[in-house]
Amino acid sequence: MPDGLTVGSTAPTFKLPAITREGEKEISLDDYTGKSSVVLYFYPKDDTPGCTTEACSFRDMLKDFEAAGSAILGISPDDAKSHAKFSEKFALPFPLLADVDHSVAEAYGAWREKTNYGKTYMGIQRSTFVIGKDGKIAKVWGSVKVDQHAEKVLAFVKTLS
C-alpha cells in the first residue's frame, strides 16, 4: 500500500464512471461520506474466474452488508462497456467503477508491479478497503485471496455499527 495510506488515514477521494442498477453514471466517494461505510474492492479484470468468484460472493451477501450499513463498490481498469456485460451476466447489484487510467488504483496502492510466467508488468493487486462513514480507512486487505474474503469483510463491517 502507498506510504501513509493506513488505517485512520483519509481515503483518497475519486469520481469515476460506473455501471449501476440504474445504468451508467458517475460515482464519487463523497456520495457516501456521512451516510454509510464503503467496501471498496479492487479487482484485475471483468469476467475472469477469481474476479467472478469475488464479485458473486459480494453479490450473494449484499443484503447482509446493507444491513450492516455498508455499500459495496467494485473497481477495475476495465471500461464501462466491459463492466456492463460483466454486471449483467452475473446480476451484480452494486456499482462497478471504471478506473481506465488506473489513477484511483494508484492512489490506493492497488496498481502494482506483478510477475506472471516470468513476465513483469503493471496491474491490479486484488485489494479491499473499508472506508468508514467519516471518510477514513477502517481496514485494509492487500493481496486478497477470494475464498472466504467477503465473509471476512462482512465480519469486520459488522464491528463498525
Image: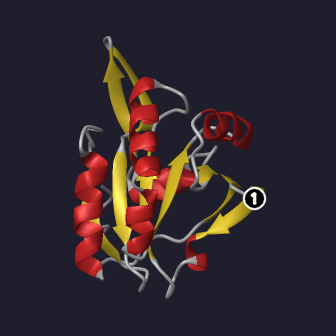
Q: Is residue 114 left or right of residue 152?
A: right
Q: Vertically, is 117 above or below 113?
A: above
Label 1 secondary element: loop
Residue 139 position, x and y percent, is: 26, 67
Instruction: Identify the residue under disc 1.
Output: 22
Position of residue 51 relative to residue 96, above or below, is: above
Q: Is residue 40 visible?
A: yes
Can you give x and y, in whole percent of width and height, for residue 51 in the image?
44, 34
Figure quadrant of residue 5: bottom left
Quarter of the C terminus within the rendering = bottom left
Residue 63 location (% of width, % of height):
44, 62
Which residue sits at x=22%, y=76%?
A: 159
Quadrant for residue 78, please give it: top right
Which residue sits at x=40%, y=73%?
Answer: 67
The amino acid type of the residue labelled 1 equals Glu
From the viewer's perspective, is 23 left or right of 58?
A: right
- Judging depth in this view, the residue of 19 and 76 nearest the camera is 19
